Amino acid sequence: MMGDSQLSGWRVFISALIGLTLTIVPLPDALEIIRPDFLLLIIVYWGLTAPRLAGLAFSWLCGFGIDILHGVVLGQHAAGFLVVAASVQYFQLRLRIFPIWQQAFAVFMMLIVYQFVVFWIDGIVGSPVFDLRRWLPALTGALLWPILVATLDTWNRRRR
């Protein structure tokens, strides 16, 4: 019989795989520009729910995986994921008591910070893309946050 921490560890891993899959699945161009950062949203969720299981090393590894899959500068997304995960850990106790709409706003701000870090590194490398559409995934991620929390909370409460 698996213990609760082992079961939760598997849930973190499985949800990260689902988030990674949703991040790399090809979409039509019209939907691609509004695709939320699913893996980052899952990292934020687990950072609030189980910070010991999904900490800074986990978020950095997930971001590094995105770097490898997208073929960008190694560490670009990893740095953004790490900044967001560190802020989630810092504000974790405060964020957990917020109503869901306030959490969504806080998540929106964290996703903006992530997009800024990626934009900044793009600028350092010499390939800045300044387009207002760059910031749309942060908005869709914030709008998706209540649904993601409800889904993962329901899955997390279920005992097997």
Image (spheres, helix red, strand yellow):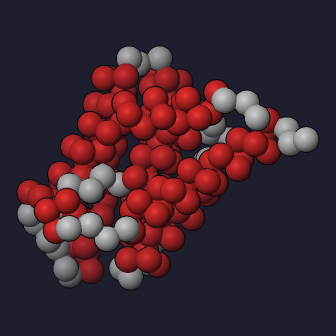
Q: Is the residue 56 above or below the residue 101 in the image?
A: below
Q: Which residue is at the front of the view, 101 or 24? A: 24
* Horizontal relation, residue 52 to residue 120: left or right: right
For image coordinates 27% across by 56% down, the residue present is 35
Q: Which residue is at the front of the view, 116 or 50? A: 50
Q: Please tell me in which quadrant of the rendered image residue 144 appears.
A: top left
* Horizontal relation, residue 122 to residue 86: left or right: left
Q: Is the residue 135 above or below the residue 91 in the image?
A: below
Residue 117: x and y in percent read: 31, 59
Q: Is the residue 30 above or below the residue 12 in the image?
A: below
Residue 78: x and y in percent read: 46, 64
Q: Please tell me in which quadrant of the rendered image residue 33 appears.
A: bottom left
Q: Is the residue 151 above or below the residue 28 in the image?
A: above
The single residue placed furthest to the front in the displayed view is: 160
How many tags in the picture? 0
Residue 97: in sight, yes or no?
yes
Position of the N terminus, as image quadrant, is top right
Q: Please tell me in which quadrant of the rendered image residue 143 appears.
A: top left
Residue 13: x and y in percent read: 64, 54
For image coordinates 30% across by 52% down, the residue present is 36
For image coordinates 57% across by 64% down, the residue present is 61
* Horizontal relation, residue 64 to residue 77: left or right: right
* Horizontal relation, residue 101 to residue 150: left or right: left
Residue 2: x and y in percent read: 86, 42
The single residue placed furthest to the right in the displayed view is: 1
Position of the C terminus, as image quadrant, is top right
Q: Which residue is at the front of the view, 16 or 155? A: 155
Residue 73: in sight, yes or no?
no
